[in-house]
Image (cartoon, rainbow, N blue to C red):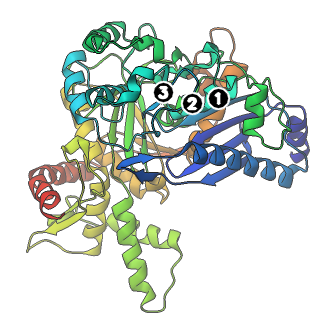
Amino acid sequence: MSEAIKKSIQDGKTILGLEFGSTRIKAVLVDGSHQPVAQGNWDWENSLVDNVWTYSLEDIWKGLQGCYEDLVRDVERKYGVPLTKLAALGFSGMMHGYMPFDSRGELLTPFRTWRNTMTEEACGKLTPLFRFNVPQRWSIAHLYQAILNGEEHVKDIAYLTTLAGYIHWRLSGNGTGDGARVLGVGEASGMFPIDSGICDYDQEMVEKFDALVADRGFSWKLRDILPRVLRAGEDAGRLSPEGAKLLDVSGRLEPGVPMCPPEGDAGTGMVATNSVRVRTGNISAGTSIFSMVVTEKALEKVHEEIDMVTTPDGSPVAMVHCNNCTSDLNAWVGLFEEFAGKFGLKPDRNELYGTLYREALKADPDCGGLMAYNYFAGEPVTGLNEGRPMFVRTPDAKFTLANFMRSHLYSSMAALKIGNDILRKEEQVKVDSLTGHGGLFKTPVVGQQLMAAALNTPVTVMDTASEGGAWGMAVLAAYRYEKGENETLPDYLADRIFAGQTGSTIEPVPEDAAGFDAFIEKYKSTLPAEKAAVEGLV
């Protein structure tokens, strides 16, 4: 097998996907069967500079090159050959944010990431104007907030893009040429609302925005500065000679590699979980948590708890994005680990997590009077701009380890449940299946069973779930390279990528679902205490 992979690498038949996550940059190289054959990693962290969460351009390029070098080392270690040719490649990144450039290709402000919540005023004006929910992290919200703030740089904007769009632009054209100023439609849907019927920016909303800022006297119109929108599988250019040298500082990588449209982490998550077909969805649960459900049509009402984005091939998606998930759980597990250490015990971390998580399955379905809020950061779904982790209980509560652990697992899913209850109960959105991936699902059964209860929907965890977004990006690059005439992305995934794949599905347990419903009612009624903690604990 290794000889076949070695030949595939030497012949330039492998495909590369690379994704910029919040804390890690990951590269995955796949062969003709779409299985990972090598990978590279680079850890990085955002910085709070002048009250703005950002990554410097230096860190972006250092991380990209370091990750690629790590991939090359893995190839050489496993197969004894250099990586010099690729069949296709694609780049993904954290969605949203703000990267404005002038006509010389110079960044006009430090990169403002999705994590910033500084655009409340802009969203308050754009949402009613568009009659469409505009979240704070979206690029259009950042642009309009900069206009409202009177920021001098806005008049000089020649191009506005995202992290994935920036990387693609530089590597496919070294910062020049209109053909490289593109985004996949899923990523573009985190910049500005998309009309799924035409797979492009909603023209009526574009015109409303241009009219809104007409008195400012800018030389640009909105479409002048936004990337061109592409569907999955479309030609997004090729790796330029300058781009090849930027990616591979050794100079061994040959240019001319076909590139697929750059996508966001939401889109690669959908691909990696085979969740791009209507009435399917996925849940990503780690430091943050979000669900994405491919809907049959647009929602009837505007809901601030729900973002409307798209799949990489342009279908409408209802996204519930919550800022908090496992951070508080991890802190409590760390406390138990410290306690064990006082007795000279050093349990394996995976075993510690597994033991504590499994204990939650023995708990009362409603957690027996225990209540937890996992808010390390603000939570837009419940209207909080800041967070304070909090645990409370009634005097007569059943204060057991099982109830304690279940209350914190429930808390990690609670805001997600509130948003999905709107979809299911108010909008009558139908969901046939949900696929879970991320750290919350690493312990078998537990996270899956409780998530099925929370959303009252079967939850599947696939054997490939751990491959993640970089693998999903490699699959999108493979689709660009391999797709047949009229072969849709859902069919490609079903027939070529996931055929024969195995996984486990857990149906909702009625007692658990009823217990979670009871918990969530108390959770919502106790929210004023969490809000008071935010105001009082400064």
Is any part of residue 334 visible from this angle? yes
Is any part of residue 499 visible from this angle? no
Amino acid type, residue under disc 1 in the picture: Arg
The circle drawn on residue 170 is 1
Residue 369: image quadrant is: bottom left
Q: Is residue 470 left or right of residue 290?
A: right
Task: Name the spot of residue 302 as percent of width and height, x first.
Answer: 21, 23
Q: Is residue 420 left or right of residue 67?
A: left
Amino acid type, residue under disc 2 in the picture: Tyr
Marks 3 and 2, how far apart at CA: 12 Å
Q: Is residue 21 left or right of residue 315?
A: right
Q: Earlier in the sequence, mark 3 or mark 2?
A: 2
Q: Quadrant of the N terminus?
A: top right
- The kind of secondary structure element at disc 1 is helix
Residue in the foreground of this view, choosing between 194 and 445: 194
Q: Is residue 128 left or right of residue 94?
A: left
Q: Earlier in the sequence, mark 1 or mark 3?
A: 1
